């Protein structure tokens, strides 16, 4: 068979090239898992999530699924092929030889678990025990892509042990103030240790030849170093956002919209030394618009900043949450064709529109968007 007959299923190098094939998560069977060392510091003291665990209500699952289906249908109308993961029974005790945990999480959001870089789909190590087996929901799809596309690379990061050595068990005392918490985050004192490589896929943003990776609660330096060794033809840049008291996943903090343009959460600005790398390569970093809501919806892990968790269909077309009037307005003023998507009922299940998807195919190749990149810019 000649090269021209080769069927390419998997190809995606960045966050903005024309999207042709995507996975959209499902809310079925989603649980609030019991607390564990990784999750405790993430849940604010006054959150309604404190002490909660068990399956989410049927009513909330149905409402989330209706919005996920709406997103899937809208993308299909834009000419995007949409696949969905296969839920398993998340409400069961799971165990490895090292630990046992009361339940799993769900199969929304896929962005947390699967990282697509070029022809590769990589199962992230993950950093929560409750999410250790989540990759199983994506295996039927990844197996199908692997069998259909002779160049597809199905990879999995080393499964972490996630023993107590992977976490600082005394990370937070109950009465820590927000200022103390922010001081800890500013000096990159996070709940995860450097016992073993840990990363969630949603801490990674793809800019062609460059991968930008958030160092925080869910991704440690060993995880970033593992990614740098795993992708030797990429430059891997660790970043951190000192204003984020719960640094988990980069996509409500730093969102590239098109080549040369990023919106950054104004409460979690990129430090100046890291910002200069983008700016001297001609990238503009704008403050994202304020969220339209003062609170996230009930039983939601995420912050109001899911407002900026947008999904680019191409570099001119953007899906954004329908009630986020300020973000819609900013995108409109920046010249995007904005597709409003009602999504707040899906937020509690693990995030916004970027989180709820993972790329299979975007047109385009691996480009170098950072021509003014010095050797010391390869930070990991
Ligand atoms: N880390 C996701 C959020 O801001 O809610």
Image (spheres, helix red, strand yellow):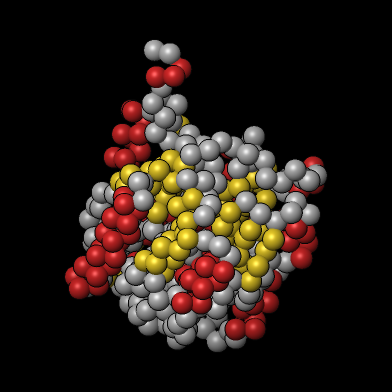
Q: Is residue 4 left or right of residue 287?
A: left
Query: Quarter of the image holding residue 243?
Result: bottom right
Q: Is residue 241 left or right of residue 111?
A: right
Residue appearing at x 61%, y 47% in the figure: 207
Above or below, comparing residue 124 to residue 274 in the picture: above
Above or below, comparing residue 233 to residue 205 in the picture: above
Residue appearing at x 48%, y 39% in the figure: 363
Residue appearing at x 63%, y 39% in the figure: 367
Name the spot of residue 256 as percent of width and height, x first.
Answer: 58, 57
Query: Quarter of the image holding residue 228?
Result: top right
Q: Is any atom of residue 309 visible in this view? A: yes
Question: What is the total number of numbered labels drawn onto the structure image?
Answer: 0
Name the spot of residue 92 as percent of width and height, x first.
Answer: 24, 59
Quadrant location of the N terminus in the rendered image: top left
Q: Is residue 365 left or right of residue 297?
A: right
Residue appearing at x 37%, y 82% in the figure: 48
Query: Quarter of the image holding residue 128?
Result: bottom left
Q: Is any atom of residue 201 visible in this view? A: no
Above or below, comparing residue 248 to residue 151 in the picture: below
Task: Decide which of 94, 53 is in the foreground and name it.
Answer: 53
Residue located farthest toward the left when viewing the structure as drawn: 58
């Amino acid at each position: 068979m000649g090269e021209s007959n080769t069927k390419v299923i998997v190809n995606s190098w960045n966050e903005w090239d024309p999207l042709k094939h995507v996975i959209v998560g499902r809310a079925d069977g989603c649980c609030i898992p019991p607390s564990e060392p990784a999750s405790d510091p993430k849940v604010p003291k006054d959150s309604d999530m404190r002490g909660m665990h068990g399956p989410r209500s049927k009513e909330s699952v149905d409402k989330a699924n209706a919005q996920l289906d709406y997103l899937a249908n809208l993308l299909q109308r834009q000419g995007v092929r949409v696949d969905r993961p296969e839920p398993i029974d998340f409400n069961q005790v799971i165990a490895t030889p090292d630990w046992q945990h009361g339940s799993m999480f769900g199969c929304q959001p896929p962005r947390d678990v699967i990282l697509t870089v070029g022809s590769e789909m990589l199962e992230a190590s993950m950093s929560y025990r409750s999410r250790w087996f989540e990759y199983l929901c994506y295996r039927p799809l990844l197996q199908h892509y692997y069998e259909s596309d002779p160049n597809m690379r199905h990879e999995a990061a080393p499964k972490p042990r996630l023993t107590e050595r992977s976490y600082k068990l005394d990370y937070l005392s109950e009465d820590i103030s927000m200022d103390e918490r922010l001081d800890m985050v500013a000096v990159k004192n996070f709940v995860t240790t450097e016992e073993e490589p840990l990363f969630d896929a949603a801490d990674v943003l793809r800019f062609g030849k460059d991968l930008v990776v958030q160092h925080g609660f869910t991704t440690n330096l060993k995880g970033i170093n593992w990614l740098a060794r795993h992708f030797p033809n990429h430059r891997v840049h660790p970043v951190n956002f000192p204003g984020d008291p719960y640094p988990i996943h980069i996509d409500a903090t730093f969102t590239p919209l098109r080549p040369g343009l990023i919106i950054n959460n104004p409460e979690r600005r990129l430090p100046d030394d890291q910002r200069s790398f983008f700016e001297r390569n001609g990238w503009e970093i704008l403050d994202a618009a304020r969220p339209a809501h003062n609170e996230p919806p009930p039983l939601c892990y995420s912050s109001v900043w899911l407002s900026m968790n947008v999904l680019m269909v191409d570099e001119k077309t953007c899906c954004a949450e329908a009630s986020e009037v300020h973000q819609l307005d900013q995108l409109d003023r920046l010249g995007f064709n904005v597709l409003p998507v009602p999504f707040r009922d899906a937020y509690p299940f693990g995030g916004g529109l970027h989180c709820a998807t993972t790329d299979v195919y975007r047109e385009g190749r691996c480009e170098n968007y950072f021509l003014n990149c010095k050797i010391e810019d390869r930070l990991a």
